[in-house]
Amino acid sequence: MRKILLFFVLLSSLIAEEGVKKVVFDLTTGDPKVFEKKILSGIAHQKAHYEGKLQELEVAVVIHGGAYKFFVKELQKTEYKNDTELVKKHADFAKRLASLVDTYEVSVYMCEVGRKGHKLDKNNIYDYVEYVPNSTIGLIDKQNEGYAYIPIER
């Protein structure tokens, strides 16, 4: 009886794993419209699609290029303080990003080389952001963990 029970536990575990999809977004855009469409709205739609099929979608985002500005707490302390379009949307973006991380368990990774290059203090980056030595290493690691690669550029 124990062998049969163990067999079904292992089988259900394997079936559950088949339902897990993984994607890493290579986020380089600094365009707020693209960011909003592909990340803030897009991830929620993709998660809903897979949940509707009783499958799980694990999402990771690797930040570099022009995308750093979407992940800072206070724009006034950065080179982005005069980006009028971003200043208008910053509070809304912050709430929606936090919701993505909390509700959909999105993992966010920032390139350390670029963060330092843009003189962004870690204390001014959202707390849920994790750091990778550089974007290439972050993307290599995620792809080797089985994540599908999706670039988000301009």
Image: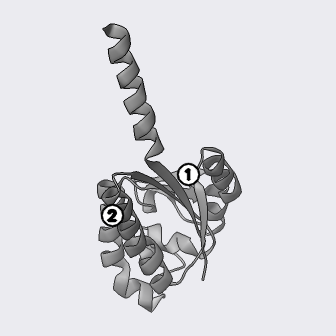
Name the mark on residue 48. Answer: 2
Camera sees residue 20:
yes
- SS under mark 2: helix
Residue 112, picture quadrant: bottom right
| Proximity of marks 2 and 1: CB atoms separated by less than 8 Å | no
Camera sees residue 133:
no
Q: Residues within 10 Å of mark 1 (few under 14, many from 20)?
A: some
Horizontal relation, residue 49 to residue 33: left or right? left
Viewport quadrant of the C terminus? bottom right
Q: Residues within 10 Å of mark 2 (few under 14, many from 20)?
A: some
Which residue is located at x 59 percent, y 57 percent? 148
Viewport quadrant of the N terminus? top left
Name the mark on residue 86. Answer: none
Percent across and percent down for residue 113 are: 67, 59
Q: CA distance from mark 2 to mark 1?
A: 27 Å
Three-letter code, disc 2: Ala
28 or 104: nearer the eye? 104
Which residue is located at x 29 percent, y 69 percent? 95
Three-letter code, disc 1: Tyr
Q: Eyeballing the image, is 19 above or below 122?
A: above
Percent across and percent down for residue 77 are: 46, 73
Look at the image and name its color scheme.
one colour
Q: Which of marks 1 and 2 precedes in the sequence?
A: 2
Percent across and percent down for residue 13 are: 40, 31
Q: Eyeballing the image, is 79 above or below 123?
A: below
Name the mark on residue 131. Answer: 1
127 or 32: nearer the eye? 32
Horizontal relation, residue 47 to residue 69: left or right? left
Q: Nearer the viewer, mark 2 or mark 1?
A: 2
Q: Eyeballing the image, is 88 above or below 76?
A: below
